Structures are given as structure tokens and as C-alpha cells.
């Protein structure tokens, strides 16, 4: 059953980007429940730290040196197919600027997400990985965190949706890799089926990101091309537990 | 946008001088005493140290005052030389009694927009930064208490402190004044700025080719040297030396992933800030470009972005030409930044 009360359910299809990018979003009065999500990076279901080498079943070893991505445009889906907005807020319940959170593996605190939602029962969580184009339209000198140069996600002419860099080693060779995802058409929406009972006002879940799935580390290939990388991002990288 | 699938190619990273600051300085607020160049975000400063004209002038006087050192022979301006964009032409800093420091003193350029200071980012604010060289045994080798006592004997200076901070010299106001002056060292009038503002003739053909390399797939320098100040202010390991004993950022964070990382410096005025890199080991821009073209020198924690570039001789020359176009001559001879007692 859906969220109760007035957070304006809609039937937005996947991949619909917000058309605005407000620096100071506001909460709707009905968004009184809180969904807390911890978003650690894992490899083979085990925690992964930047700079630590991990082995894949293929025999290759991986080391991530930089990993950051944006999340935003959260929605909760009810049993009737309606979607309800979920607003990213900080620990003080203030909506995050631009409706975005930059999750950076080098900053553990950034892996903690908090969403303001209308109380209710939901069947799925939907969110976007990336920065919608309305944010790119904001003049550089008018931008605040997390759209600034210092994020390492701003290349002047565009924001990156996701940036992943590291090394992969096999018996044959060791190579650096980098996935810099930032084209407008590379904005991705992820949908995860999971019963989410927010009727009591609060719920804590974990939203792990499986780096091994993202990198295709279970395959004989040491890395994947960017098309497969993006497919992995949507299909197998995130889970909810 | 850059198309980077699995890029086993390499950017040219130019970690040369220093970089700085977080606009997230707490309690920050817009200021009116200093003006941001076109295209820069608004300049902000701590609410308790807004850079008034009196504070900047006092900081300038202190910046060149050798009484800030134990022997009365070293001022901030000894290592931060205006003609060198407030970088140090020596390989490493030379402190009191000729003591050698461990790193090359970085330029002080647009530090008002910095989010951390020193090559390893150990200070979060300019005020905090200002206190450290004074107390470093290899630099000025004194204490803020001793400096305060010396300055309080100078009636004229005491008056200037009174005007600027409504009180006598103290550790707090000394560092605040120094920070105010450093915050005023704003540079945004290079030929490249004119080019970006629409004067297409401001750069030569070679410089424009160099800019394309800088921003393009061949050089990929922009991965780190990006934005209004040509730096992301991030910490990266550019593989400067295979056996570099300097742990860099890891000294602060104690993370193995940060071993040998140093702050990405601004490239503004890079043509006059030699020698380059945190260890001052590269004497010319040509040597810097060669270093990146070679993919570094094999430090164990070299960033994956550092890979051999395969630039031609002509491309390297174009890149150097572009880097030299980043010089802001008005910054180097601005009388407002000079030693007020210089003859």
C-alpha cells in the first residue's frame, strides 16, 4: 500500500529527470517519515576500502583509488504503481542543496543517506545516479556544494555522474582504469524491489554498492566497457537489505 | 564531455605548486573589501575576520616583518616572493640560520578560495595556516607569544592592531592579519583570462594548441587542473619519485591510499613559480611536461591517471607555451602586495 497523505503521487516513468535544480529544496508537509540508508561500497559482499587490494574469483585483483557518485531524484513506489517523492535531508532534517548527495568512498559520512518521505508502505525504491541537466545549467560561479570544482566531479563544462578509478592486476599485467561517466545520456535510474514499511515513521536499511558487479569482476575479462559498466550500474550493482 | 570508457591512457597532471581552501570555512560570509575576478565564485572569509582594508594592510606589514622569526632574519616574504607569485625560487624553504625545510614553499595565489593549506592540507583555514611557519623550527622557529611580546613594543604597530582589531597584538590577531593579507592576493588577469572573456587574439596559435592539449584527450590535464583557479584542490600522487620518503597527505590522514599524495596546485602564474613539485625537484616547465609525458617515475602509489602520454616535441612545446600564458603580470608587480618598507 502506498504512502498515506499528500506527497503528490505521480506515475513518473523511469529516467525522467527533474526539470529544476533548486539550491534550497523544501519539504512537503506530508514527508514526516524518515528512511535512513547506509551505502557502503562492497566487493564480493565484503566491505571494501579505498587503496585495498581485493581478489575476484577470476583471479584478478582490484584496487580502487577514487570512487564517487551522485544520487538524487529518490522516489518510493507503492503497490498501485504510484511514485512518491523522497527528499534527501541532512541529520538536521534540512533538504540537501540541489536535491543531490555526493557519495564519496573517501568520506564515510557521505555514505549515510537520509530521506524524508510520507508515511506508508511501499514496494520499491527508485533513485537516480548522476546529476540532472538542470544542475549543469547553473553558472559555475553561482554553484555551491556539491556542484563545486572541489568535488573532483566538476569538469567545467559538465558534472560527472560517477567517477571510478583504480588498478586491476591479472597474471598477465597490471593496468590503471578509470570510468568517468558524465554524458547527459549516461544519467541512470535504479529501481530496487523491497518491502519498505514506513508506516511507523522511520526505517533503516542498507544500500550496498557491489563494486565487483559494477566492474564485471566475476567475468574472465578484467574490466568492462562503459556500456556494460552502465548496464551493470542499473541491473546488478545496488541492492537493498 | 570526455569519453572515457576504460581509459588506459593518461592525463598530464601538473602538480606543481600549492593549492588551497574550502569555501566551507565555518561561519563564512561574503565580504566587500576584496573583489572576486570574473568567473570566480563569491569570495568568502570567516565571519570573525572579514578582510577590511585595515586588516589587509596590517597583514601586509606583518608578512614582510622579520620580527616574526626567532633571529629577526626571516619574514614570510623571504620564501613567498612576489615576483615568483609568492612562491619560493629556492628548492626548499630556507629558515632561520640557514636551516633547510623539507618542501618547496608553494605560491600564494587565490588562497581565499582554498579549502585546505600546505602541500598535505594539514590546515583548514588561512588563520590556522599562518601560525605554523612562525613556530616551525626549520622556518621562523619562534612562538606566537614571543612574537606578540616583540610587536607590543612597537607603538605604531600597536596602533595599527587597535585600528584593525580593536585590541593589541595577540596570537589571534597576528594570524588573522596575516590571513587577511594572504586572502587579498588575488590573481585573475592573465592572457588566458582575457581569452576566456572573449579576446580570441589574447593567445598565440601555439598557446591555443597547448590549451587544446590541456583540455583534451591527449594531455587531460583538466582532470585535476580544472575550474576558475585551475585546480580541484584534490590530493593526488603524480609519481614524482619512486623512492620519495615524503608521505604527503598520508601524514595527516594515516590512510595508505593517501601515501605520497599532495595537493593539486593552481596553475595560475605557473610560469614564474619554479622550481616545481612539492620537493622542488623540477626546475623548468619543460621538465614538468616531460615528467608527465613519461608517466611519472614509478612511485608505488602513483595515481592510475598518470600514464605515458606520448606527446611529440611540438606538442610539449605548445603545452609549455600555454602554461606560460597563465601568468598575470599585474599580480607580480601590484604595489599593494609589495613590502611596504621596500625602497
Image (cartoon, coloured by chain):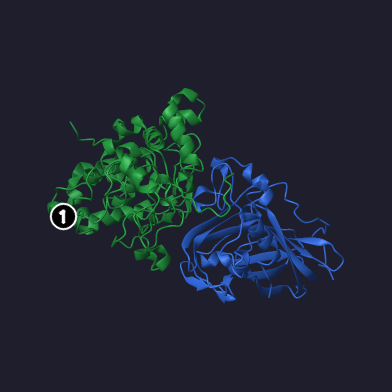
Chain colours: A blue, B green
Residue located 64% across and 51% down the image? A131
Residue B101 in sight in this render: yes
Front-most of B314 and A47?
Answer: B314
Q: Is residue B211 above or below residue A21?
A: above
Residue B285 percent location from the top left of the image: 32, 40
Label 1 crowd bin: few (<14), some (14–19), many (20+), radius 10 Å = some
Q: Quadrant of the C terminus of chain A?
A: bottom right
Task: Return the residue found at the far top.
Answer: B201
Q: Determine the image quadrant of residue B60.
A: top left
Q: Determine the image quadrant of residue A239.
A: bottom right
Residue located 60% across and 60% down the image? A224
Residue located 68% across and 65% down the image? A115
Task: Return the residue found at the far right.
Answer: A80
Dot 1 corresponds to which residue?
A: B99
Assign a secondary structure to mark 1: loop
Chain ID at mark 1: B
Residue B39 percent location from the top left of the image: 51, 36
Residue B248 percent location from the top left of the image: 34, 60
Q: How many marks?
A: 1
Residue A65 in sight in this render: no
| Residue B189 left/right relative to A203 | left
Q: Determine the image quadrant of residue A203.
A: bottom right
Front-most of A167 and B95?
Answer: A167
Q: Is residue A54 above or below residue A163?
A: below
| Residue A212 left/right relative to A122 | left
Q: Quadrant of the N terminus of chain A?
A: bottom right
Residue B294 percent location from the top left of the image: 37, 49
Front-most of B9 and B135?
Answer: B9
Amino acid at each position: 500500500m502506498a504512502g498515506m497523505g499528500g506527497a503528490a503521487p505521480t506515475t513518473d516513468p523511469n529516467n525522467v529527470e527533474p526539470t529544476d535544480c533548486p539550491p534550497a529544496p523544501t519539504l512537503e508537509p506530508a514527508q514526516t517519515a524518515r528512511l535512513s540508508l547506509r551505502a557502503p561500497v562492497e566487493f564480493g559482499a565484503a566491505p571494501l576500502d579505498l587503496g585495498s587490494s581485493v581478489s575476484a574469483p577470476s583471479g584478478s585483483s582490484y584496487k580502487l583509488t577514487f570512487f564517487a557518485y551522485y544520487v538524487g531524484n529518490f522516489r518510493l513506489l507503492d503497490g498501485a504503481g504510484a511514485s512518491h517523492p523522497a527528499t534527501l535531508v541532512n541529520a538536521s532534517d534540512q533538504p540537501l542543496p540541489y536535491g543531490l548527495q555526493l557519495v564519496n568512498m573517501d568520506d564515510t559520512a557521505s555514505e549515510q543517506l537520509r530521506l524524508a518521505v510520507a508515511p506508508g508502505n511501499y514496494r520499491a525504491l527508485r533513485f537516480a545516479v548522476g546529476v540532472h541537466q538542470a544542475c549543469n545549467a547553473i553558472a559555475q560561479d553561482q554553484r555551491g556544494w556539491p556542484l563545486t570544482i572541489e568535488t573532483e566531479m566538476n569538469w567545467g563544462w559538465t558534472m560527472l555522474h560517477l567517477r571510478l578509478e583504480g588498478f586491476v592486476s591479472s597474471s598477465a599485467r597490471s593496468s590503471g582504469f578509470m570510468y568517468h561517466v558524465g554524458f547527459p545520456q549516461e544519467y541512470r535510474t535504479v529501481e530496487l524491489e523491497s518491502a519498505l514499511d514506513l508506516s511507523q515513521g522511520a526505517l533503516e536499511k542498507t544500500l550496498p554498492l557491489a563494486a565487483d558487479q559494477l566492474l564485471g569482476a566475476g567475468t574472465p575479462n578484467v574490466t568492462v566497457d562503459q556500456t556494460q559498466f552502465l548496464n551493470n550500474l542499473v541491473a546488478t550493482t545496488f541492492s537493498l537489505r | 564531455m570526455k569519453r572515457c570508457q576504460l581509459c588506459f591512457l593518461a592525463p598530464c597532471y601538473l602538480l606543481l605548486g600549492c593549492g588551497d581552501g574550502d569555501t566551507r570555512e565555518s561561519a563564512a560570509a561574503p565580504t566587500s573589501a576584496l573583489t572576486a575576478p570574473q568567473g570566480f565564485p563569491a569570495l568568502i572569509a570567516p565571519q570573525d575576520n572579514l578582510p577590511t582594508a585595515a586588516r589587509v594592510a596590517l597583514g601586509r606589514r606583518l608578512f614582510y616583518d622579520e620580527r616574526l622569526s626567532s633571529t629577526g632574519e626571516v619574514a614570510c616574504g623571504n620564501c613567498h616572493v612576489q615576483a615568483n607569485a609568492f612562491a619560493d625560487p629556492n628548492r626548499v624553504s630556507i629558515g632561520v640560520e640557514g636551516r633547510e625545510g623539507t618542501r618547496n614553499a608553494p605560491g600564494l595565489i587565490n588562497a581565499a578560495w582554498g579549502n585546505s593549506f600546505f602541500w598535505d592540507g594539514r590546515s583548514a583555514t588561512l588563520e590556522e595556516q599562518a601560525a605554523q611557519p612562525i613556530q616551525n623550527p626549520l622556518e621562523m622557529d619562534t612562538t606566537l607569544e614571543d612574537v606578540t611580546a616583540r610587536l607590543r613594543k612597537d607603538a605604531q604597530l600597536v596602533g595599527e592592531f587597535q585600528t584593525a582589531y580593536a585590541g593589541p597584538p595577540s596570537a589571534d590577531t597576528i594570524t588573522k592579519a596575516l590571513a587577511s593579507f594572504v586572502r587579498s592576493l588575488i590573481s585573475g588577469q592573465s592572457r588566458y583570462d582575457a581569452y576566456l572573456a572573449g579576446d580570441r587574439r589574447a593567445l598565440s596559435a601555439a598557446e591555443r594548441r597547448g590549451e587544446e592539449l590541456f583540455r583534451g584527450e591527449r594531455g587531460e590535464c583538466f582532470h585535476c587542473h580544472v575550474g576558475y583557479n585551475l585546480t580541484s584542490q584534490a590530493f593526488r600522487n603524480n609519481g614524482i619519485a619512486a623512492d620519495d620518503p615524503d608521505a604527503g597527505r598520508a601524514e595527516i590522514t594515516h590512510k595508505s591510499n593517501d601515501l605520497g599524495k599532495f595537493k593539486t596546485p593552481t596553475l595560475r602564474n605557473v610560469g614564474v613559480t619554479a622550481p616545481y613539485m612539492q620537493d622542488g625537484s623540477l626546475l623548468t616547465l619543460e621538465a614538468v611536461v616531460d615528467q608527465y609525458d613519461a608517466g611519472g617515475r614509478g612511485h608505488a602509489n602513483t595515481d592510475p591517471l598518470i600514464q605515458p602520454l606520448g606527446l611529440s616535441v611540438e606538442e610539449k612545446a605548445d603545452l609549455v607555451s600555454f602554461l606560460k600564458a597563465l601568468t598575470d603580470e599585474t599580480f607580480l608587480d601590484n604595489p599593494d602586495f609589495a613590502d611596504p618598507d621596500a625602497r
